[in-house]
Image: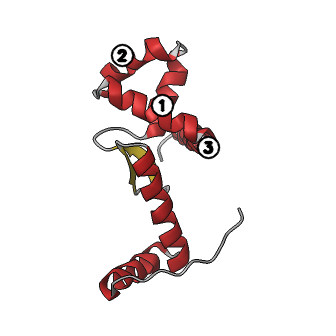
Amino acid sequence: MTTEQVSIRMPKETLRRLDAESKRERVSRSELARAFIEEALRMEAHRGIVFKPGPAGRRPALAAGPDVWEIVRAWHDLGVPEAEAIPRLAAIAAVSEHEIQTALTYYVAYPEEIDAWIAQVNVDTERAFAEWERRQATPEA
């Protein structure tokens, strides 16, 4: 990624909060500001998408619903065309068809990012299941 330097002015209180958050997240002030600006631009372009924090990092999600990767994974699991999947996914996720379309539109814009989330969740799920199976096979002492 090619970068350019930019200078901005902001209120001292905003800068204080940015510094506090960057320390909490253990990232530089610049990296955190860049991430927040990128998220804001994505939310502006994809109304209804927000970014939620979690143990695996910040991820795109529906404002009042599941993460985008969850919707896309369910769509892939259904194995049906988008037009047929939208009402089914809306019922499964308990969100509107418009919200499902919002998530799928976001996916079209950032497929590598969402596919990476799905791949990581699949790895984590397989690892957790293998650990569960190992514990089931181990007799209690």
Give the tally of numbered discs. 3
Near-viewer residue (108 or 25)? 108
Residue depth check, mark 3 versus mark 1: number of the one nearer the observer:
1
Near-viewer residue (85 or 54)? 85
Q: Which residue is mark 1?
A: 104
Q: Which residue is mark 2?
A: 87
Q: Position of residue 96 (x, y in %)?
A: 29, 26
Answer yes or no: is residue 2 visible. Answer: yes
Q: Residues within 10 Å of mark 3 (few under 14, many from 20)?
A: few
Name the residue type under label 1. Answer: Leu
Q: Position of residue 5 (x, y in %)?
A: 62, 77
Q: Going from the N terminus, do you reach mark 1 or mark 2 first?
A: 2
Check whether the beta carbons of the residues at disc 2 and disc 3 lie within 8 A of each other.
Answer: no
Residue placed farthest to the bottom in the image? 12
Check whether the beta carbons of the residues at disc 1 and disc 2 lie within 8 A of each other.
Answer: no
In the displayed structure, 90 sits above or below 43; it is above
Q: Position of residue 61 (x, y in %)?
A: 40, 44
Q: Which residue is mark 3?
A: 116
Q: Going from the N terminus, do you reach mark 3 or mark 1 first?
A: 1
Name the residue type under label 3. Answer: Ala
Q: Residue at x 53, y 68 (%)?
A: 34
